[in-house]
Image: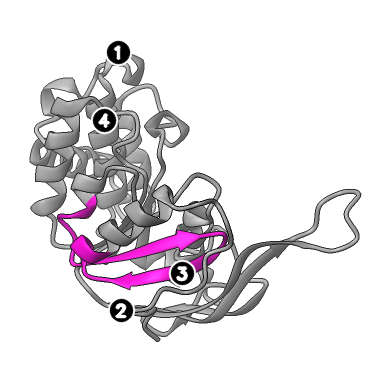
Amino acid sequence: MSIILDRAAVRVSIDGCPEPKTLLEPITLTLTERRIGVIGANGSGKSTLLRMFNGLVPPSSGTVTVSGADSVRDVRAVRRRVGFVFTDPLAQLVMPTGREDVELSLRRSVRNPRDRRAQAEAVLGRFGLLSLADQSVYELSGGERQLVALAAVLAVSPDILVMDEPSTLLDLRNRELLRRTLAGLEQQIILSTHDLELALDLDRVLVVDAGRIVYDGAAAAAVEHYRKLCAADPAPVPPAGGDPARP
């Protein structure tokens, strides 16, 4: 599986402004590695970039394709291939319990209610959540909610899993649980994070600043670049040297 961005940019119109605001400058990327991270400051464009990967945000210009499927023309095919997990699982969990939420994810692919329940229980059991299946999602810990949201997305077997800052609301214990869970998944994973230890687990890391990819390379080097960027005088940052953004 691969995600390809070809000069993909995002601009939005804002009331009262004569010119559109640029959220992402034109970006060209080919993403094939098994574990990819996106790091950068709040407001840098990380979430916008990730949301292009499954058609939640269409490019204003250029294209985004997932294994040949265009994110605008073939958005349904793209969303079948790319599962998206939001920062706050409560923004994603729409049913009262984890069991019902996973069953909701399966409603189109598994028509028989009995089979759907059995498959939902199998998914919840895989993540050690079966004993919590009928608890209110509001009674679960942050880590448990995040795992339920993850289970609901993975129930439909996407090829690619995109996660927007999945560890932000988690304590240390649950962050470690999430890291172990992600390490055991077979899907290609692309995630944004402020957790630099989590970023160091990944195969490739993109650094985003002011709507541009300013560094693209191995995790340790990318994290070091980001640390220097944060420590530097806040001024426009030119594209990084060393390991430049890859086409």
Task: Give the magenta part as a residue range.
Answer: 199-221
Which circle marks residue 213 in the picture?
Answer: 3
Cβ atoms under marks 4 and 2 closer than 8 Å? no
Residue 181 x, y percent position in the rendering: 12, 44
Which residue in the structure is indicated by mark 1?
139
Judged left or right of residue 180, residue 147 is right
Which residue in the structure is indicated by mark 4?
99
Residue 28 x, y percent position in the rendering: 48, 81
Which residue in the structure is indicated by mark 2?
243
Secondary structure of the residue carrying tag 1 is helix
Residue 98, located in which quarter of the rendered image?
top left
Q: Is residue 96 above or below residue 212?
A: above
Which of 137/171 is in front? 171
Eye-nearest disc, 2 or 3: 2
Q: Amino acid type of disc 3?
A: Ile
Secondary structure of the residue carrying tag 2 is loop
Residue 247, located in which quarter of the rendered image?
bottom left
Residue 149 x, y percent position in the rendering: 31, 38
What is the distance, in whole Å, between disc 1 and disc 4 at their CAs?
14 Å
